[in-house]
Each structure stands twice: as C-alpha cells, then as structure tokens.
Amino acid sequence: MVHVRSVLQNLCSALLLLAAGTEALKFDIQAGSGHDSLSRRCIRNFVAKDMLVVVTAIVDGYKGDGMQLNMHIMDAAGNEYGKPKDIAGEQRTVFTSHADAAFDVCFENILTGNKYVQNPNRHVELDIDIGADAKDWAAVQASEKLKPVETELRRIEEMVGEIVNEMDYLRQREQKLRDTNESTNNRVKWFGFLTTFVLVGLWGWQIMYLRAYFRSKHLI
C-alpha cells in the first residue's frame, strides 16, 4: 500500500511538471499556392474516443493583407471537426473525438493576389489541450465553489484517470496483437504440416509411378 501511494505521488508530481512546462507550438508558414509543401503545415496528435479537445491557434496578420490562412481539423477515421477559413487573431475550435485515432491540424497559407506582400509569412502559435487540460477549471471552481487546492486535485485525478484508461487501451491492443500473432503462427504451422504431407505424398506417388514405368519396360 505504501509503495502504491509513493508511485501515485511520483506520478502526480510528474504530471504537474509536465502541465507547468507545456508551451504552445510556434512556427511560420510561407504563403504560396496552398498545394506546395512550403505553404502547408500539419500537426498530428492522438486522442481517445469521446475526449474533449480544444485547439487554439493565434495567428498574426489581418484579413485582407494579401494572404489567406485556412485551418482544417480531421482525424484518421475521416471525421472532420472544423474547417475555418481566412483566420487571423485567435481561433478556437472545441470538439469531442468520435474515435480512437490520430487527428491532424493542418494550415495552408494562400496568396490571394489582391495586393503586394513584402514578407509572405504568417506566424502561428498552436496549443492543443486534450481531456482534463481542455476543461475550464476556473469555471468548474466557480460553479462548484472549490478551493484552489481542491480544483488542482480534481484536475490531477482526471489526468491520472486518463492515463489509466490509456494504459488499459494499450493493454487491450497488445492483447489483440498477441492473439493475431498466435493465430498467424497456428495457421503457418498447419500450412507447414499440410505442405510436408503433400510433398511426402507426391514423393511416394513418384516412386510408385517410376517403379510401374520401369516394370512395364522390363527394366527391373
């Protein structure tokens, strides 16, 4: 019991450090036709089913500056979660995932051609919050009248629960892969036995055929 409590304390401390050390992803996108690699940028992340996701993008520039920055959020299962066009300033998209799958947040910066652009680049700050990190804990604290320590403990509890669920998901996938490997090994084994029996039967048939042939020719 003491060992389990120590593990949980270390895990919670690690979560707090990770939560405190996370920063938004910052990058620049060069404007172009939208179909070339320089004017497109995609960020991929994995999310479990029925998880709350908040995607926040802060883009410099302004609408009508000769560039049009579009964003597209889509997962590997084909579900679309947002496709805002010509974004500038802060753009926030909130959705609940429909499947256990990776999702992509893609940006494309297109030159509109309606004015000259001296520096055809847009600077993007992207922040993706999933699960407990995506909740508005200030609103939860206000609505439930919680103390700051209680709010932080609630957040850590949900984060630990998400980690446990993810470990269960990985364990189920590992079990499924193990079952698939065992099934494949059994099929290969029986296929090997069948191939051996066929070759032995063919070898016996060849011997009987050659013996009958030589006898018919009075060679033996």
Image (spheres, grey):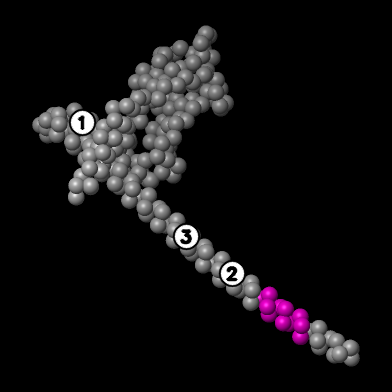
For the record, the magenta segment spans 198-208
Which is more N-terminal, label 2 or label 3? 3
Image point 64% across, 72% down: which residue?
195
Residue most extreme to the left: 145
- Name which residue type carries label 1: Trp
| Vertical relation: 205 (above or below) 184 | below
Which is more N-terminal, label 3 or label 1? 1
* Label at residue 137: 1
| Vertical relation: 196 (above or below) 135 | below
Spatial CA distance of label 3 from label 2 is: 16 Å
Disc 2 versus disc 1: nearer the observer: 2
Q: Position of residue 34 (x, y in %)?
A: 53, 25
* Label at residue 180: 3
- Name which residue type carries label 2: Phe
- Name which residue type carries label 3: Thr
Q: Residue 177 occupies which quadrant of the picture?
A: bottom left
Which residue position is annotated with label 2?
191
